[in-house]
Image (spheres, grey):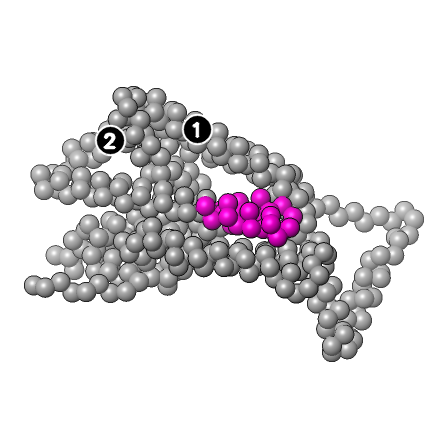
């Protein structure tokens, strides 16, 4: 029976992927709201134990979360603008230093001379009446362009979060009612409760871990004298939601910042920001995170990378951010399914010991 259903499962997965790709603008706010509701649900439960009505508790939690996000964005907006403006200059300084190093150790070549001629021509004034104006959109202009869509998606996601928090139990009851048999009803309740509990614990734990990492990185970079250290700490916590790829991008950015700093007196000082971040990330990924999450949420790195490639292709940045939480949900569902336990085992970092018959 399980073998006979495999073509149906495969067709359903292909159809789901196609729908996720075609209707990405619709599904991204829904998935974001569902994941955020998983994180905030435990806090609403606590308020309910204090006899706070569900609608009021959800309103307080969503309102507090919104205020916290707005405050965080306002706090890092100016450092982010300065950092984005500094990156091109840092890249230019790094390029110049690399070229000077090559010329000093390997001599000048035709490429170096050609680049120097191009720079001289670019620096010459243009003839009277001839003006070439190349305007690049500033960070503020890019943010304004994205503002309408982002604001609409954010508002929709917040409304959905409130709906999920208040009416989530009602949706579960309606889902159970449509199940044909009593065993199906019980299995559905067990699966939904397992997803709610496990995913809420995972998302809440990983959010706290990334907040701590971002704060520690920000303080460490501040002590090293890195400009806009607060922004880089915020970005470090955010990029840590994208395993492997996020820390790699973050390390590259800090290398650029270090070598682009004109005050860096040595190679060691230039490497210090990236090395400090790398050390903190190693401690977090190999010590803190396994200690907090345990092996229940351990997933093979190859599976994570392939999954991130898929969702990055489908949804871009949103797919990279939401990919791992969706993978955790998929694993929990497979573990609770009769036909999916073997697939869940394949996703583990190492095989589980066989149980005695």
Q: Quadrant of residue 11?
A: bottom left
Q: Quadrant of the C terminus?
A: bottom left
Would you name the residue on which mark 1 appears?
Answer: 64
Label 1 Cα neighbours within 10 Å, binned few <14 / some 14-19 / many ≥20: few
For the magenta stretch, what is the residue range?
Answer: 212-238
Q: Secondary structure at mark 2?
A: helix
Q: Percent x, y for residue 123? A: 84, 57
Q: Percent x, y for residue 32? A: 40, 40
Residue at image position (31%, 57%) is: 298
Residue at image position (38%, 38%) is: 36
Q: Of discs 1 and 2, which sits in the foreground? A: 1
Query: Which residue is the extreme one toward the front?
Result: 223
Q: Which mark is residue 169?
A: 2
Please, what is the dominant secondary structure of the magenta stretch? helix
Query: Which residue is the extreme one toward the right?
Result: 128
Q: Quadrant of residue 98?
A: bottom right
Label 2 Cα neighbours within 10 Å, binned few <14 / some 14-19 / many ≥20: few
Gap in angstroms between the C-alphas marked 1 and 2: 22 Å
């Amino acid at each position: 029976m399980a073998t006979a259903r495999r073509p149906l499962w495969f067709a359903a997965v292909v159809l789901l992927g196609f729908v996720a790709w075609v209707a990405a603008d619709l599904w991204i706010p829904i998935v974001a709201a569902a994941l955020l509701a998983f994180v905030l649900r435990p806090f609403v439960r606590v308020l309910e134990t204090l006899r706070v009505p569900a609608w009021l508790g959800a309103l307080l939690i969503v309102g507090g979360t919104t205020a916290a996000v707005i405050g965080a964005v306002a706090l890092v907006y100016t450092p982010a603008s300065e950092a984005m403006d500094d990156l091109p200059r840092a890249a230019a300084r790094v390029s110049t230093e690399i070229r000077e190093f090559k010329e000093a150790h390997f001599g000048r070549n035709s490429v170096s001379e050609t680049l120097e001629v191009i720079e001289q021509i670019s620096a010459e004034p243009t003839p009277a009446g001839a003006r070439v104006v190349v305007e690049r959109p500033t960070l503020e202009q890019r943010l304004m362009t994205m503002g309408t869509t982002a604001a609409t998606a954010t508002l929709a996601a917040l409304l959905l979060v409130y709906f999920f928090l208040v009416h989530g139990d009602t949706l579960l009851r309606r889902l159970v009612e449509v199940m044909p048999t009593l065993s199906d009803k019980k299995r559905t309740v067990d699966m939904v409760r397992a997803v709610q509990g496990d995913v809420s614990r995972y998302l809440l734990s990983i959010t706290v871990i990334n907040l701590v990492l971002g704060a520690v990185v920000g303080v460490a970079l501040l002590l090293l004298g890195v400009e806009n250290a607060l922004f880089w700490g915020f970005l470090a916590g955010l990029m840590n939601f994208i395993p492997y790829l996020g820390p790699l991008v973050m390390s590259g950015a800090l290398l650029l910042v270090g070598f682009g700093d004109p005050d860096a007196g040595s190679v060691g000082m230039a490497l210090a920001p990236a090395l400090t971040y790398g050390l903190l990330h190693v401690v977090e990924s190999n010590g803190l995170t396994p200690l907090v999450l345990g092996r229940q949420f351990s997933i093979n790195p190859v599976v994570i990378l392939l999954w991130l490639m898929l969702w990055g292709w489908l949804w871009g940045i949103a797919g990279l951010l939401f990919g791992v939480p969706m993978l955790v949900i998929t694993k929990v569902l497979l573990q609770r399914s009769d036909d999916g336990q073997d697939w869940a085992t394949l996703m583990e970092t190492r095989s589980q010991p066989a149980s005695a018959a």
